Amino acid sequence: MLDRDVLLREIGLSPIWRSRETTTAATASQTSVQHANAESPEPLNTAQADAPNTPPLVTTASPTAESDADRAARIATLSWAALTADIAACRACKLCETRTHTVPGVGNTSPEWMVIGEGPGEQEDKQGEPFVGRAGQLLDQMLAAAGKSRKESVYIANVVKCRPPGNRDPQTDEISACAPYLERQIALAQPKLLLALGKFAGQTLLSTDATVAAMRASPGERSGIPVVVTYHPAYLLRSPLEKAKAWCDLVAAKRLSESRAE
Ligand code: URA
């Protein structure tokens, strides 16, 4: 029987993600990412306007607050900068009470791909940037294998912009309160492809309660933009053999986005 490392090597997924046809390109891309880390300015981090929280005087929206519909309509008109400021000041759900920083998103604001995760974890909450922990390192490797990077061709955001305490799942009311922000980010970014990482991103983008397996099997669309659902990198860290399936999803995503570029 094949041992796991041998199997992963055989399918080109160890020690790092590599496309057989694009090994050289992927390696060059990784090198340039590392180089850029050392010498280039940071990518636009739309969290920069944010500041650590002070204890709330009012914990949730006041009775005079705008209606959900008015709020969504107002958010739908915001620029990137105004959106970042609005997110930093947001008190639309209870996650504002426990966050350190809001985590709006990072990367190229006119991206080829927009990657959507679930919500900030501990490190992201501390730094105000999405996917900076171990799952983020794997995500960067996955993107590099597909010839993409958060510095150049990808914008990364989450379904909820504040950390759910203890990394619990985001709740329905929290996802709904944050939905106008995600909607506006997609409208401003106009990516060729939306890559949804895991159940919450897939279900939110595709407005479904289907499983990841079902969503992977039938790519959908959101606002006319193709949506490919794949496994969340945190899940892939726990279940590395699933990387082969995620790799197939990335190949499908690349094909779809390239066909839209033609
Ligand atoms: N997991 C996510 O879904 N998003 C992050 O930003 C970090 C980890």
Image: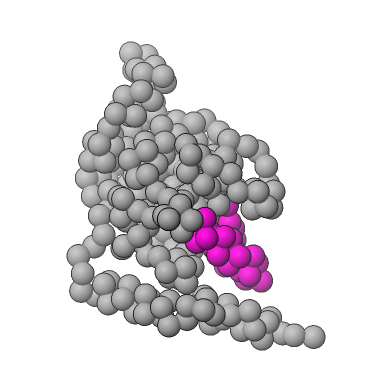
Residue at image location 47% in from the left, 36% down from the top: 223
Magenta-highlighted residues: 229-256
193 sits to left or right of 87: right
Q: Residue furthest top?
A: 64
Residue 184 in percent (x, y) is at: 36, 36
The residue nearer to you, when weighing 150 against 53, is: 150
* Quadrant the N terminus occupies: bottom right
The residue nearer to you, when weighing 111 against 9, is: 111
Residue at image location 43% in from the left, 83% down from the top: 24
Position of residue 161 relative to residue 125, above or below, is above
Q: Is residue 136 visible?
A: yes
Q: Quadrant of residue 13?
A: bottom right
The residue nearer to you, when weighing 194 against 150, is: 194
Dominant SS in magenta: helix
44 sits to left or right of 67: left
Asked if residue 236 is among those painted magenta in the image, a careful observer would answer yes
172 sits to left or right of 105: right
Residue 246 in percent (x, y) is at: 59, 64
Residue at image location 58% in from the left, 80% down from the top: 12
Q: Is residue 130 visible?
A: no
Residue 104 in percent (x, y) is at: 34, 45
